[in-house]
Each structure stands twice: as structure tokens, then as C-alpha cells.
Image (cartoon, rainbow, N blue to C red):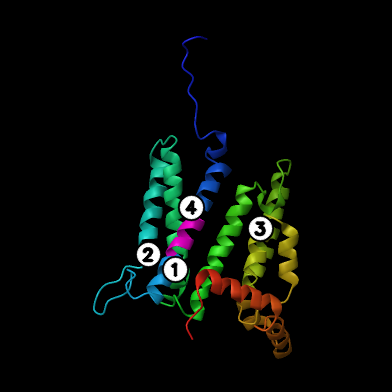
């Protein structure tokens, strides 16, 4: 009709709440993590770069700002009737907060500054697992391999079984297999029956000396896959201190 004003959403349906907005969160998360990790590496190697800890001063780790941003954006997402583009700004803020917070994941569990130690590499592992989980959500992979035609009892049985297999993967230190296994049950099964890492909870509680020796050989730092993973971590997150 002539003269009729048509309202067009410049963001399109692609970025509506759902997997589209999850994509915005994922990209924001990745950019924030890479930016704050780069800043931390510059603080470590360049004397004039801001962010260093001064003697006798108080240092607020960037996970504090990340937590505050997560709380604010999470509250706005629930409490405010947001429309585009404000909805996308909140999604970006949530992703940035998650990136800042997970970059110091190792500090959550150890309650001390292990950022540049070998234990601090846990933060990099957490970021990789989070990105994998988010990417599977964005591409539309169904959790637990379920379809809409599943019965209630069948769904409950599948969820319980796959969750149990994924927990076994996590206990064995096979984090990536556990995350992917939540969406692809065959991967969870493969991880649950494979050899666990020698420093994992499963190995400490259940492995005898012979099986622990096999685990140490399987995950030795000299193995090609282990070296490749270590080099990728050094390239992205920075090499741990000696």
C-alpha cells in the first residue's frame, strides 16, 4: 500500500534470540578472551604496558570485571524488555564478561594467582571446552542426540546414560570428549572406555601401577598430539613460567 510504513529489522531473523544470539555471544567471548590474554602477555613482557601489580597495592583481576559484567547483562536479559539492537548489545556484554572471567578460570579453583604457571593452563582448557560447547549449540546440534519424537521415559534414560558417560570422560580428564559427548553420545562412549589421563581423578582412584604406567606413556609430553596441543596453548595463551 502506498504510503504504508514497513518496519524492517536491520539485524534480520539471523540474530533473533536463540542460536543467532548465541553466535553473537560466542564471537564476543572469543574476541574478549584473545584481547585480555594479549594484554596480559604484554603486561608480562613490556614494562610500560598497564595492568601490572604494584607492591602494597590492590590488584583487581579482570575476572572481577567479567563477573560484574555477567551479572549486569544477565539481569538485564531477564528483567528488561529489550529489543534490537539493545538485545545484541547485552549479548555482546555477556560474551565479553564470560571471556574475561574464564581467562582466569584457574584462579577460581586454586584460589591463588597461578596465571602464568603450569596450573594456569587450566584456564585455556576451560576456554577451549566452552567454545566447543557454544559452537555445537550455535550450529544447532541437539543435546544428547535426542529428537523431538522421543518419549518421556526414553528421553530420561538417554539423558541419564549420556550424562553418566560424559561424567566418566570428565573424571578421566578427557574434557573435550566429555563436552562433545553431551551432543554426540558415541563420542561420550568412546571417551568413557578409553584410557584416562594419569593426573585425573579416575586414574588416582582406580588405576593400578601398571595401568597408570600405560596412561603416563599414552599422555607423555613427547607424543606428537601432546606436543601439538602444548604448542597451540603456548601460542594462544602464552608459555608458562619455568
From the viewer's side, name the closer residue of 108 and 136: 136
Q: Residues within 10 Å of mark 4 (few under 14, many from 20)?
A: many
Q: Residue beneath label 3, please?
A: 182
Q: Is residue 33 magenta?
A: yes
- For marks 2 and 3, give the one nearer the viewer: 2
> Is 119 located above or below residue 126 in the figure?
below
Q: Residue beneath label 2, please?
A: 62
Q: Mark 2 falls on what kind of element?
A: helix
Q: Residues within 10 Å of mark 1 (few under 14, many from 20)?
A: many
> Is 142 located above or below residue 188 in the figure?
above
Q: Residue beneath label 1, please?
A: 104
Task: Check contact, mark 1 vs mark 2: CB within 8 A.
Answer: yes
Q: Point out the tag, 4 or 2, that comes first from the N-terminus.
A: 4
Residue under the point 57% across and 64% down = 128
Q: Mark 3 falls on what kind of element?
A: loop
From the viewer's side, name the closer residue of 94 and 76: 94
For the record, the magenta segment spans 29-36
Task: Check contact, mark 4 vs mark 2: CB within 8 A.
Answer: no
Q: Residues within 10 Å of mark 3 (few under 14, many from 20)?
A: many
Q: Tell me residue 4's x, y (percent).
A: 47, 13
Amino acid at each position: 500500500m502506498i504510503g504504508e510504513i514497513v518496519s524492517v529489522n536491520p539485524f534480520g531473523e539471523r540474530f533473533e534470540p536463540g542460536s543467532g544470539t548465541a553466535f553473537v555471544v560466542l564471537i564476543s567471548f572469543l574476541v574478549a578472551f584473545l584481547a585480555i590474554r594479549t594484554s596480559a602477555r604484554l603486561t608480562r613482557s613490556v614494562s610500560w604496558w598497564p595492568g601490572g601489580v604494584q607492591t602494597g597495592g590492590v590488584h583487581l583481576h579482570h575476572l572481577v570485571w567479567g563477573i560484574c559484567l555477567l551479572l549486569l547483562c544477565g539481569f538485564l536479559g531477564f528483567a528488561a524488555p529489550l529489543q534490537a539492537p539493545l538485545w545484541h548489545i547485552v549479548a555482546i556484554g555477556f560474551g565479553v564478561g564470560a571471556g574475561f572471567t574464564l581467562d582466569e578460570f584457574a584462579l577460581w579453583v586454586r584460589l591463588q594467582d597461578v596465571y602464568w604457571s603450569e596450573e594456569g593452563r587450566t584456564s585455556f582448557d576451560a576456554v577451549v571446552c566452552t567454545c566447543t560447547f557454544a559452537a555445537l549449540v550455535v550450529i544447532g546440534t541437539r543435546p544428547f542426540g535426542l529428537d523431538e519424537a522421543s518419549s518421556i521415559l526414553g528421553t530420561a534414560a538417554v539423558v541419564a546414560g549420556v550424562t553418566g558417560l560424559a561424567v566418566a570422560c570428565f573424571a578421566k580428564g578427557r574434557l573435550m570428549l566429555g563436552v562433545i559427548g553431551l551432543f554426540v553420545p558415541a563420542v561420550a562412549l568412546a571417551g568413557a572406555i578409553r584410557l584416562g589421563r594419569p593426573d585425573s581423578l579416575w586414574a588416582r582412584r582406580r588405576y593400578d601401577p601398571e595401568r597408570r604406567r600405560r596412561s603416563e606413556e599414552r599422555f607423555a609430553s613427547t607424543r606428537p598430539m601432546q606436543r601439538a596441543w602444548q604448542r597451540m596453548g603456548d601460542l594462544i595463551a602464552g608459555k608458562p613460567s619455568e
